[in-house]
Amino acid sequence: FGSSRAAQRAAKNTHFYSLSSPPSFATMVLKTDLCAYSEYRIYPGRGSRFVARDGKVSFLLNAKVTSLFHQRIKAVKLRWTQAWRRMNKKGKTDDSAKKKTRKAKKFQKAVVGMSVEDLQKKKAMKTEIRQQAAAAEAAKAAKAKAAAKTKAKSKAAAAVPKNKGKDVPKAPKGGAAGGGGKKDFKARK
């Protein structure tokens, strides 16, 4: 009598497993939607659907989101929404997706009054030679300046005044000499 009960219990408890093979539990699949405003997951039994006049269905998470949605406040302007995080590049960062910054290559451009070849020649010169060349150029410039001064002096000496012998001062405009009075407009008729 007692042994048969033990056998019955053993038959009932067949769902216990041995240590060698764990049970294969089926995971329950929950159908989740995304909130149209905040882009958070909405689990079954949560949220509400809003159908607009044009027939567009919006699934909203909670009363807060619904209120903001109907006030037409942009989700991008609220820091806690996924839209704001996406706009401000927060969260997911792929190292492979980041652009690699290129190193700027050196490129020689011509300067006003100097070609690229002249610049390269100057770079190739040693500092002593460069200083000598600069001194020579300065001497040339000084010589040219002195020549220009002597030329200007000779021109000034050669120029003869046109009104020689006529050293009469001009009379002032507006009537008699020495008279600087106001004009009388009312006196005219």
Image (cartoon, grey):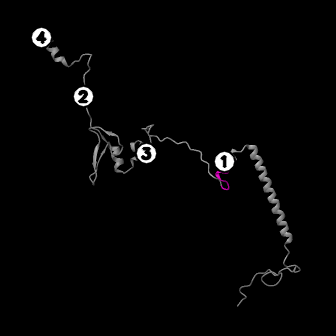
Q: Position of residue 14 (x, y in %)?
A: 18, 18
122 drawn magenta = no
Name the residue carrying label 2.
26
Q: Residues within 10 Å of mark 2 (few under 14, many from 20)?
A: few
Name the residue carrying label 3.
87
Q: Amino acid at mark 4?
A: Ser
How far apart are the alpha carbons under marks 1 and 2? 77 Å
Task: State which tag comes first along the sequence, 4 or 3.
Answer: 4
Q: Residue at x 28, y 44 (%)?
A: 48
Disc number placed over residue 4 in the picture, else none: 4
Is 124 on the left-hand or right-hand side of 174?
A: left
- Report the magenta residues as a range: 112-121
Most distant residue in the left direction:
1
How far apart are the alpha carbons under marks 2 and 3? 39 Å
User: In the depicted view, which residue is nearer to us: 186 or 61?
Assistant: 61
Q: Position of residue 146 (x, y in %)?
A: 82, 60
Task: State which tag comes first along the sequence, 4 or 1.
Answer: 4
Is 103 on the left-hand or right-hand side of 77?
A: right
Q: Amino acid at mark 2?
A: Ala
Q: Secondary structure at mark 4?
A: helix
Q: Residues within 10 Å of mark 4 (few under 14, many from 20)?
A: few
Answer whether labels 1 and 2 touch (C-beta < 8 Å): no
Q: Name the quarter where the N terminus is drawn.
A: top left
Task: State which tag comes first along the sequence, 4 or 2.
Answer: 4
Q: Position of residue 78 (x, y in %)?
A: 41, 45
Q: Amino acid at mark 3?
A: Met
How far apart are the alpha carbons under marks 3 and 1? 48 Å
Name the residue carrying label 1.
120
Q: Amino acid at mark 1?
A: Gln
